[in-house]
Image: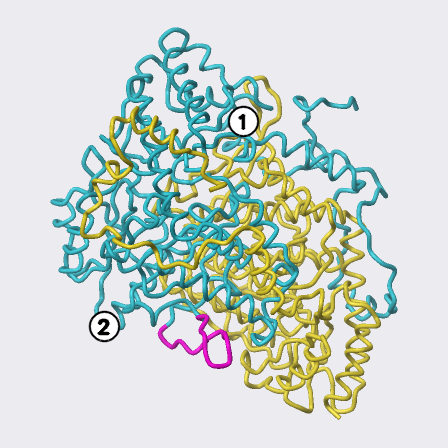
Amino acid sequence: MRYLPNTAQNQRAMLETIGVGDIEDLLVKIPAKARLARPLALPPALAESDLVRHMRGLAARNADADGFACFLGAGAYDHYVPSPINHMILRGEFFTAYTPYQPEASQGTLRTIYEYQTMIAELTGMDVANASIYDGGSSLAEACLMAASITGRTEVALAAGVNPLSRRVVETYVDGPGLKLRDVPSPEGVIDIDAARRVVGGKTAALVVQSPNFYGCLEDVAALAELAHAAGALVVVVADPVNLGVLEAPGRQGADIVVGEGQGLGVPLSFGGPYLGVFAAKNEFVRRMPGRLVGATVDLDGSRGFALTLQTREQHIRRAKATSNICTNVALCALMATIYLSTLGKQGLARVGELSTAKAHYAAERLGAIPGVGLRFAQPFFKEFTLKLPKSPERVAARLAKQHILAGLPLKTFDRKLADCLLVAVTERRTKEEIDQFADALAKAVA
Amino acid sequence: MPYDNQRAYDRLIFELSSPDRLAFSLPASDVPVEPALAAVPAKYRRSQPAALPEVSELDVVRHYSRLSQMNYGVDTHFYPLGSCTMKYNPKINEDMARLSGFARLHPLAPPALAQGALQLMHDLAGMLAEIAGMDAVSLQPAAGAQGELAGVLMIRAYHEARGEKRTKVLIPDSAHGTNPASTALAGYEVIEVKSDAEGRVDLDDLQRHLGPDVAAFMITVPNTLGNFEPRVMEIGELCHAAGAQVYMDGANLNAILGITRPGDLGFDVCHFNLHKTFTTPHGGGGPGAGPVGVKAHLEPFLPAPVIVKGEDGYALDWKRPQSIGKLQAFWGNFGMHVRAYTYIRTMGADGLRAVSDNAVLNANYVMKRLEAQYDVAAPGPCMHECVLSARRQKKLGVSAMDVAKRLLDLGFYAPSTYFPLIVEEALMIEPTETESKETLDAFCEAMIRIAKEAETDPHAIHQAPVTTPVRRLDQTKAAREPNLRWRPTT
């Protein structure tokens, strides 16, 4: 077996040193009646070439974004992934290390996390970012718990435009602590400010606003932040960091905590994970933050060095009283984002945002001009928009898939009122030709 | 600035930045840009450009190559970090995870167009259920701690569905910190159960706490001292008799593949760490994957959606009225599922059994070779890892941390230190099955050498490490004056 180096001779020598005759003699503490008396019922082992053939067969049954023009978004986006990312993350020193418990032998990982924290803080306009949470959904859930812990309040007001998939994660996480979720309606695609004023009050720990929201619309975060702060509530902003090369940093719009799905920062689509939960906050809240934090310090010789810090927040020290139960996070995805942001840099990230919004606006114009088709909401948007169709979005999407176009997400299962709508995302990777083909195919499908 | 050699390399990417240097390749726009930007109201547009690095592609590649060289990893070093199962991560796993049909598949692609991915997840869940002797497995949890949260929430939902209000969860004092943290997050009061000197659950203490208010008992098997808890089935029966569920933390599953199964031992729930037992990479701290397995009575409460196989192929079943809900926005860390699936299909049943046999053999070999120099925390045989104590060395002024730092200079990553909390000066060593006798011998010789140095020259050990990119760090300064981001002036 190529992963098991002990030969029969090695085993004999080791057993002799241990002073037993057989490996079975080492398993004597296991109750006999719980021993498995048969081999595990698993498919037979495959040699590498057979395995590759089998795996290619499975992979071929999926409509990936190479074979299909992908207009799906809703929290996962087909953005450009620069080549160096994969080469760098595959370096075994990064790839096969673990949480940097021994900082002297983990400076590579620690430095990349420190760079990551700096970049995320800069993008979001916050003071401090952590080393990552699992994904956008769990990041938001942690933010809600943190806001409740900071304010001592028991309700969280969630805008209707918060991604419903993330919202369901929040529902799971607030169950134990017993927080109550309250809805802020968005009948016209963005938060109704008057309704928000009625919902946000003395019990509200945080108002959660996503911008651009699930429908693609841009929210007036600054106005909402003012409203929430007036009620003594914190403001949690859900943002896609890829957009922040062009869109205003939530920190400059009054956010207290910024979270988001960082998948677009060079992390593969990979059918939904592993992704990157971005988490940033104001400095005053740093000791309430979940997750790892890396800080700069000095070594015995006075040289700069980096280490995990403020660990008294964490489960391995504080146990039941920790700020979160998170241990393993998504350091490698954070490394992908760090290399992505280094590669794209100041100019490239802005360029990705400009191209994405340009293509999205072009697509909205082309698709919206089809008879019977139109934008569902009259609101500014960025790279995603909600399209109203005259025919069943499920059927239209299925028809376009036959032409290798993933047209977008039918919204019926998320909101019955939007049963005639399709959520369309357009990144910088989509070409004018693909958008034009999409428009032509859609025109035929709804005619 | 002088060009640094590797030992002295001390740059951050921001310090390599030079205005207008580029490392990206983006096409010119084939559609109008200005009207689109104008359609985004000015108040929503960024007022100050994000101060990201401006570097060339070679700057990026060289910088991160050099940073990587400041790390120890399994590919370069023996990494006996106990409880973390730092085994070899097969390269074929990576090739498979990067097939376009997996890596470039959008999570919201219609299920009819994602049949290969859904089949892989469905079949992986089935294989994990067989390995653990469970009736159903959800792949959704992102890591072990999230698997624990899911498991405890299912237990809570189960009791509530039966109209029972139970408020406490019992956890041994030797447990991983995530156990009490996850349990508290699920809304339970955590009650610590004492262990005896050998790390076994104190049955008297357990029985003292068991009662109608106890929802569950949560235990790691093999325990965190690396030993198999011989009375584990008796413990399960006691808990069940009191109406409590039993949860197995599967962090140490690498010890028992094909030998015994959590389900057969009487557990109602267990989680898996795919990044430990099933060779998905540790990545410097994740991503992991923490699937959770349950017996049939807990199946209605599994996270939604559940992947089902029907007449029309594989589908996501959202109609789960008793589900605890979602843990991630999408379906789980699929990329890790591909790697674990690849590994299990590579190994087969006999291969997995050989994994555990050799993991146990290696750990016992290391324990035997070191028992003259270090105190063994609990008498053997151990399972896949052994816990030693440096209490003898401590009397000479050399702590477990000193031993760990000295190992770094001798070319090894360190064992887990100061865990489990019930062992003084703990050194938790998990060799894994992928290490050869030669490597284990070299490691043991290094440990023996350190024990001798503790007697002859403890001062030298206090200086360690000296071969690493930095020496011991001022942790107090790091915590008292938090510096968590780079700024241009520093």
Say left or right for A343 vs B401.
right
- Chain for disc number 1: A
Q: Which residue is the site of mark 1?
A: A104
Badge 1: few (under 14), some or many (20 or more) residues near its Cα, within 10 Å? many
Q: Position of residue B485 (x, y in %)?
A: 63, 39
Q: Same chain for the residues at labels 1 and 2, yes or no? A: no
Q: Residue at x 63, y 30 (%)?
A: B69
B311 is within the stretch colored magenta: yes
Q: Dot 2 lies on which element?
A: loop
- Is B11 in the magenta? no
Q: Is residue A69 above or below residue A1?
A: below
- The 10 Å Cα crowd at callout 2, few under 14, some 14 to 19, many 20 or more, is few
In this view, the residue in front, B262 or A376, is B262
The residue lying furthest to the front in this view is: A9
Instruction: Please tell me which residue is depicted at 78% across the width and 38% down the height of the picture.
Output: B58
Q: Is residue B113 visible?
A: yes
- In this rendered view, identify the residue nearer to me: B53 or A3: A3
Q: Which residues are magenta?
A: B306-322
Amino acid type, residue under disc 2 in the picture: Arg
Q: Which chain is yellow?
A: A
Residue B141 sits above or below residue B475 on the image: below
Name chain B's colour.
cyan
What type is the residue that disc 1 sits on? Glu
Q: Which residue is mark 2?
A: B162
| Chain identity of mark 2 | B
